[in-house]
Image: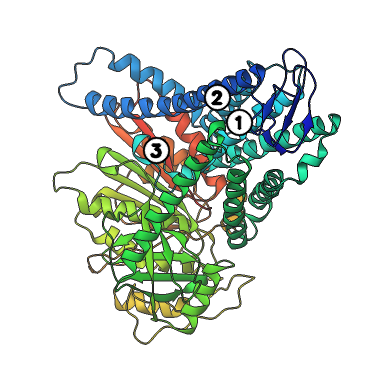
Amino acid sequence: MAWSGSGSSSGSGSGGSASGNSTWGGSGSGNGGGGGHASSGSWGGAAAIARQATNERQLAMFAAAICGLMGIFIILHWSRAIFSKVSHSSCSTMPLAAPFGAVTRCIRRLLIRKVPRFNSAGHALVVASYVGINAAICFTNLDFSVASNFAARAGWMTAGNLCFVVFLALKNTPLAFLTAYSYERLNCLHQIAGCTTFLFMAMHAITYTVYFSKKDLLRLLVEKEQIAAIIAGFAFLSATLSAIVLRRIWYELFYVVHLTCFMVGIACACFHQHELGKRIIIILLLAASMWVTDRAIRVGRAVYYASNNSATLYPLPNGGTRVVMKKVPTRAVPGKHFFVWIPAIRRFEMHPFTIVGTQPLEFIINSHNGFTGDLYKFAQAHPGAKLRASVDGPYGTFPDPMEYDKIVLIAGGSGASFTFGLAVNLLERMKETSTKSIVFIWTVRQHESLSWFTQHLQTLCTHDHSGKINLSLYVTRAPVSPEGRLNPRVESPDDDRTHTMSSSSSLGASPTASTPDVEKALARAKISLPPIAHHRSTLSDDIEKEMERERGLHVEHANKGKRVSAIETTTTTAAAEEAEDTEQHGNPRVTAGRPDAATLIRQAVNSTPSSQRVLIAACGPPGLMKVTRDATASVIRANGPAVELHCEQFSW
């Protein structure tokens, strides 16, 4: 961005003087800091005009490079989709199918592994490419002999990156369709791009301030255009710091600060560079228009779905809340998520929660501080209460499980809302002749938490295709009496809450009881939570600790209302035996400890013919996701089955 100035000023180099309202455009010929002569207008020297043209070309190259980076993902996504369909069709005759598959699998084997500071090596590669593009565009075709040249370039880079940051933040992003990456999966790059934008803005401001100080032109900083720039700078600084400091500890405050500072910052930036001839205003207006359009779409949806809509609240054991919406929006699919608005809890806030069922639309929400904590307290005080509500969405992308022969679903804690939704939806879509198989693994901290998904367990066990699913449940804190029986009532060390069953509740409708009451309700429906078999765990204890910090995005599903016989318990003491059991379709088991997820994944993939496809979908704490990523990478082979990995966003 160029600094605007007015009044009578002088410059060095080939410049002369300028009177009236002027824009400091840059250097003179060779060495210099002023620019050409202009009266009541812009500094219009040949050097300034050339610098403007160069910066415009550089920014066009930046836009082309970013579009090219996105284009690579678009091409890879659709080429892999086409290749998968053709290579697994009965009439596949593509001569390049085998080489293409071998190359892509070799690359994916490396890129999906977890690396420090990033979800995967692929994420790190994208960030490195983005940083490299910025460095190349910023520091090439630039005359460093004049400080104002670099200051101006940094201003242009600020504007270009700001536009990209807004694009990445769009909830209704076109990339969700073009690349299967929805906004929450782009959040890592959004954060990096935001920090990069602020860095360029700081370099722009500092360099120009030093330049003006050397030229004895600091008086320009008190002009209204420069005051607007200073306000914009502090606004973007606050937005950046809020993302770094507040986001993890107080999300609601972060969101308000982040959003407010963005609006103030972009408005002041537009006032700072309001001349259409400079073209930066066009970039800023493009960013603002994208943001406004996205907000308008979201508000429009929320208003539309608010008509004659309500949410019914039921408290669950261990701090959970079941939310049942009256209306079911179109395109609602289990596994995706909605932003839920309940004004009686928080009038000006919407929060994302995963869909686990659509008949009716249901969410199960784990309570933490803020909105989810207030929601749970209200549900406890008023079980079965109906509140005015609305939703915005659905959002999220993931592979269609119907396109795979074996589906491995792994969840930790409330991440099961994602996997339960996928599993139940998949069973309902299967045909009688389907040969698909499902491996379902769920780990919870306490036995009581199993009752959150009673209806789901019932559906998975009694569905016509229940023989095609292998269900394994794990409890990391398994209280057992001296006689070896499950202790019916154990509170979390930091939880002294008690729960009472609503008199109007039924199985899965309002399970608000302590463990004995839950088990009575389950007994009336002829379903029992099994005792726990002890199991040697191999995952790190960090997974259990991470579950304590999990955010509730998650949900429950309605089922066909069939009754279930007692769930049998299988005892296993070795990871290899456990892996073998995974392939035996039968009644589920509850095991004390944590699963050896890596062994289970390897066993599931290795037992699949090379002509078939395997989907591994997981949602849980970072430790579990790391194990899942690394284990999946180890089983991707050129001569093995096609393996697809999807790690669902566990928290914001």
- Foreground mark, 2 or 3? 2
Is mark 2 in CB contact (under 8 Å) with mark 3?
A: no
> Looking at the rendered structure, which numbered label has been put on residue 156?
1
Point out the residue furthest to the bottom here.
Answer: 503
Give whichever of discs 3 and 1 has the lower sequence position: 1
Give whichever of discs 2 and 1 has the lower sequence position: 2
The residue at the point 80 percent across, 33 percent down is: 212
Q: Is residue 468 visible?
A: yes
For badge 2, the amino acid type reads Glu
SS type, badge 1: helix
The residue at the point 46 percent across, 59 percent down is: 553
Instruction: Decide which of 103, 478 is in the foreground and name it.
Output: 103
**Residue 9 in picture, x, y percent from top left:** 78, 32
**Residue 592 in picture, x, y percent from top left:** 51, 58
Is mark 2 in CB contact (under 8 Å) with mark 1?
A: yes
Instruction: Decide which of 566, 141 is in the foreground and name it.
Output: 141
**Residue 152 in picture, x, y percent from top left:** 67, 28
Q: Write down the residue under mark 3.
A: 175
For badge 3, the amino acid type reads Leu
Is residue 226 toward the left or the right of residue 558 in the image?
A: right
The residue at the point 77 percent across, 46 percent down is: 222
For badge 1, the amino acid type reads Trp
355 to 97, vertically: above or below:
below
Q: Write down the residue under mark 2.
A: 56
The residue at the point 47 percent across, 26 percent down is: 69
> Looking at the rendered structure, which numbered label has been put on residue 61?
none
